[in-house]
Image (cartoon, grey):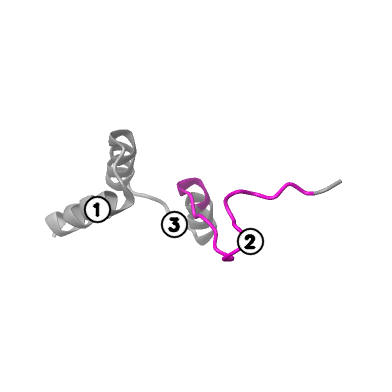
């Protein structure tokens, strides 16, 4: 029986997609947890359907605003 190939890792270029779920698992292994504030920001950005660049800009704005 053949193993099914995942569409998340194309064999042509050897890259893979790091989803938020996978990122959370990696962070948990490293002992890292999101603060409530950052969790809220990320949840809100997902609900608003922001792109990756828009999310990064939002996070950068929030971090610089905190200082």
Residue 32: mark:
3
Residue 44 image-quadrant placement: top left
Residue at 25% of width from left, 50% of height from top? 54
Mark 1 neighbour class, 10 Å CA radius: few under 14, some 14 to 19, many 20 or more = some
Q: Which residue is mark 2?
A: 11
Residue at 31% of width from left, 47% of height from top? 51
Element assignment for label 2: loop
Q: Position of residue 58 (x, y in %)?
A: 22, 50
Q: Is residue 16 left or right of residue 47?
A: right
Q: Which badge, 3 or 1, is on the more N-terminal residue?
A: 3
In whole angstroms, how far apart are the C-alphas of marks 3 and 1? 17 Å
Is residue 13 placed above or below 4 in the rendered structure?
below
Residue at 59% of width from left, 56% of height from top? 9
Question: What's the magenta region?
Answer: 3-22
Is residue 67 placed above or below 42 in the rendered structure?
below
Mark 3 neighbour class, 10 Å CA radius: few under 14, some 14 to 19, many 20 or more = few
- Mark 3 in CB contact with mark 2 (< 8 angstroms): no
Q: Is residue 8 left or right of residue 56?
A: right
Q: Which residue is mark 1?
A: 59
Which of discs 3 and 2 lies nearer the camera? The answer is 2
């Amino acid at each position: 029986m053949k193993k099914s190939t995942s569409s998340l890792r194309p064999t042509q270029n050897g890259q893979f997609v790091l989803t938020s779920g996978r990122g959370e698992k990696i962070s948990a292994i490293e002992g890292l947890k999101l603060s409530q504030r950052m969790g809220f920001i990320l949840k809100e950005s997902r609900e608003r359907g922001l792109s990756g660049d828009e999310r990064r800009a939002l996070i950068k704005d929030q971090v610089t605003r905190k200082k």
